[in-house]
Amino acid sequence: MKIFCIGIGGIGISALARYYKHQGHDVSGSDQTDSELIHMLIKEGISVKIGTDSNNIVRGTDMVVYTVAIPTDHQELAYAKSIGITCKTYPEALGEITKEKKTIAVSGTHGKTTTTAMMYHALKECGINPTVIIGSLLSGVGTNFIPGDNDWMVVEACEYKRSFLNLHPIHVLVTNIDADHLDYYKDLDDIKSAFQSFVDKIPVYGCLVTHQDVTLKTVGESVNGDSVDKESIELSVFGDHNKLNAQLVIALIQKLGLDEIKARKGIKEFKGTWRRLEYKGKTSNGVVVYDDYGHHPTELNATFEALRSKYPKGEYTLHVFFQPHLYSRTKIFMDEFVKVLSKVDRVYIMPIYAAREIDDGTKSTTLVERINSSRGHAESIVSVSDLPLAIEAINDTKAIVVNIGAGDAYIQLNKIKFS
């Protein structure tokens, strides 16, 4: 088939493009902005156009796959539909693939990516090499797609716009359920209903693995991840939240009757994923720097607690460079962001990353003012391009820096020469 991917630079669509390429299809795509990920796809033989143009879609194209983030009147998508090309969203296309596999779907408001990666490492150590589609780049292999050699598949299942309802899982892991994506969902109960609809898809011979405080019902078996002794879990990545994620993986391994000792070895050897408390190195001033994708108050808090477990308060100072993601999320969770960010030693707030949204008047400077009013220590960074200089200006070897957010600040972070 000849397949065209709109938004191919996205972490999900790029994984799907790699999957199709591996299956022998002729794959190409487009994206609004250039990126390191796009350069990787080009090196792998996937043609990519930068910018939107209906001419990017050549005659003979069999299918167009597009990210749910683009508008319905997107030029390329509208053109493809007008000439009768089959068009599928990313979750619809992924759902078709999961029909053909014994799929383990990892869902939850927070921790999906890390748990998906842990699941892969555990299965691989047990001698099962599944196909993997994940929302980040796996450490060591540097890709978000791994081709399997059997009919097992592990996928990250996103709840945004109920995307995961397109999937066909046998086993489901739910890390947690929290209020998020409130630009789409009405409230927490609405989100919970979406997760219930998702686990309703589990067949009677499948199972749901989650923690005791997550109240979901399934026709399959329910497996309590808390039954695994958290303190017995050895990890290379740090943070209590990662041990909670690992509990779910081990619980499913037990249910599948696989070698738990080997699975634990695989989890211990897991070194992390791209932008999930990723260690970047030290600046020329000897300052330790991490990068993280967290963009919700709960995620920020988990990241800060993990860093404090490794770098105790009083002995080290924690400097946070935060790029808020979405006007709606910043506005809705303003109080929660203020509470979490007021606890760290120093906060530098960048302008809000709009992503798919139109400016509603919410300002990052308001967050700065609120933090300082709450006895925190915050200042504004006028432009995201100022991030490298701001980090390199810190001259304290006891300072720990984390750049955090789901926007594009990490691109500027990569301009720093780390040792």
Image: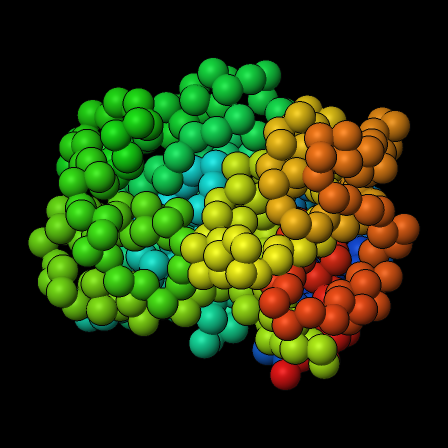
Give the camera-side residue of 381 and 225: 381
Quarter occupied by the C terminus: bottom right
Say whether residue 321 is left or right of residue 248: right
Image point (18%, 46%), residue name: 228
157 or 367: nearer the eye?
Answer: 367
Count of numbered labels shown in the rendering: 0
Counting from the top left corner in percent of width and height, residue 142 is at 52, 73
Display colour scheme: rainbow
Hey, which quadrant is residue 121 in on the image?
A: bottom left
Residue 127 in percent (x, y) is at 19, 70
**Image position of 62 with respect to 197: above or below:** below
Residue extending furthest toward the front: 314
Nearest the viewer among 280 and 61 is 280
Regarding residue 11, the answer to whether it shows in the image is no
Residue shown at the point (71%, 30%) measured from the top left: 374
Q: Residue at the location (20% across, 36% down)?
A: 224
**Residue 407 placement (x, y as % from top left):** 71, 51
Residue 261: quarter of image: bottom left
* Residue 108 visible somewhere in the drawing: yes
In this picture, is 333 found above or below 53? Answer: above
Q: Position of residue 268 (x, y in %)?
A: 29, 67
Query: In the image shown, does 40 or 318 lie closer to the viewer?
Result: 318
Residue located at (74% from left, 44% from top): 377
Taking 35 as reference, is 315 left or right? left
Quadrant where the N terminus sits is bottom right
